[in-house]
Amino acid sequence: MKAGPAIYGAVALLVGIALGVVFTPEVPDVVQPYLPIAVVAALDAVFGGLRAYLDEIFDAKVFVVSFAFNVLVAAVIVWLGDQLGVGTQLSTAIVVVLGIRIFGNAAALRRRLFGA
């Protein structure tokens, strides 16, 4: 396993967090309903990528496509729910489904890293 790309990712994450804290960006009102769902969808891709990395089957192309596709599909489902008047229910459904996937990947990471 190469540590180089992982270091770049960790540094990019830290720089992004620092920039967010320093500049405190404002989220437009139009985007606010979609932001939590996008974050959960992105976390799903990140945990899946970490699991794939530890299983030594990580592919950067698959990760990027998964990341973008998860966020896009989640946003479209919430937008569709808003159009139908059931945005809150679909948002909850997305959080539940992706939450199950995140915790499944987290459990696999725990087993892989700690043997428990």
Image (cartoon, rainbow, N blue to C red):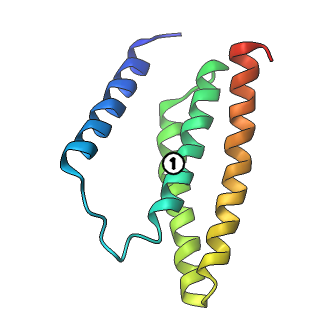
Relative image position of residue 85 (x, y in whole percent):
60, 89
User: In the image, what residue occupies the spot 44% across and 62% down?
Assistant: 35
Relative image position of residue 88 (x, y in whole percent):
61, 77
Q: How many marks?
A: 1
Q: Where is the C terminus found, in terms of image quarters?
A: top right
Q: Is residue 110 left or right of residue 64?
A: right
User: Is the residue marked by circle 1 packed among few (<14), some (14-19), or many (20+) residues within 10 Å?
Assistant: many
SS for dot 1: helix
Q: Which residue is mark 1?
A: 42
Relative image position of residue 45 (x, y in whole percent):
56, 43
User: In the image, what residue occupies the spot 62% across and 36% down?
Assistant: 48
Q: Is residue 10 left or right of residue 92?
A: left
Q: Is residue 51 left or right of residue 6?
A: right
Three-letter amino acid code of the residue under disc 1: Ala
Judge by depth and name the residue closer to the eye, 1 or 47: 47
Judge by depth and name the residue closer to the eye, 5 or 38: 38
Q: Where is the N terminus found, in terms of image quarters?
A: top right
Figure quadrant of residue 27? bottom left
Q: Is residue 83 above or below residue 91?
A: below
Relative image position of residue 15 (x, y in whole percent):
27, 32
Q: Is residue 60 left or right of residue 91?
A: left
User: In the image, what residue occupies the spot 61% across and 69% down?
Assistant: 91
User: In the image, what residue occupies the spot 43% across and 20% down?
Assistant: 6
